[in-house]
Amino acid sequence: MRIYIPVTLTKLRQVVRARELTPRGGVVFGVTADLRAEYPEADDEELEYLAMSDAARACLRLLSAAGAQEPPVRVVISADVDSATATPELDRAAAHLDGPVSWKQIAAFHLDGAEAAEVVRAATQVVDEADLGDDDAEFTVGSAEDLALAWYAPGEIAYLLEDLDSLEPSTDRPE
């Protein structure tokens, strides 16, 4: 089963160092029965895109909770696991994974580009209101969701982080 795990850039750095990831609270996203029921005409690729989109929206919530010290970058890690248990009470594509995801199970990393920073920052400030039905907030969140995440292979991600580090004025980062 392909799963999508929302993380922050800080957590991504930890994953690269540790070569494994334990999803926060065990929460992951994937193609669940509820997602299939909501989109009965969609094929597997379309459903996986929707699950990844739900994970990207969850990134906005993580960034909102982390505050201003966390760079406004949505990060979704896709991985292949044997199974995960659907948790429809959380979200249409939410599932629970027991245990860690190994580096070998990671299929790809999906991140915002630098041009998305301001849009993502604005979305993190109103994601809770959007979840509660505020139309203006939903428009702001939708603007972030309209931005495609870039795809990186596991072998590329350390180099991307090095490039990001070289652009930052300070090397002091929260761990």
Image (cartoon, grey):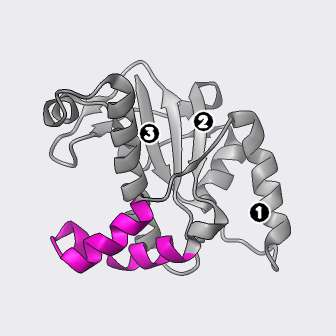
Callout 3 crowding tier (Cα within 10 Å): few <14, some 14–19, many ≥20: many
Q: Amino acid at mark 3?
A: Tyr
Relative horizontal placement of residue 3, taking residue 115 as reference (left or right): left
Numbered disc 1: secondary structure: helix
Residue 147 in view of the camera: yes
| Residue carrying label 3 | 4
Q: Main secondary structure of the magenta part?
A: helix
Locate the N terminus and report the quarter of the image it occupies: top left
Callout 1 crowding tier (Cα within 10 Å): few <14, some 14–19, many ≥20: few
The stretch in magenta equals 118-145
| Residue carrying label 2 | 108
| Residue carrying label 1 | 164
Residue 128 in view of the camera: no
Report how many numbered discs are placed on residues in the image: 3
The answer to whether mark 2 and mark 1 are in CB contact below 8 A is no
Q: Check if residue 121 falls in the magenta segment.
A: yes
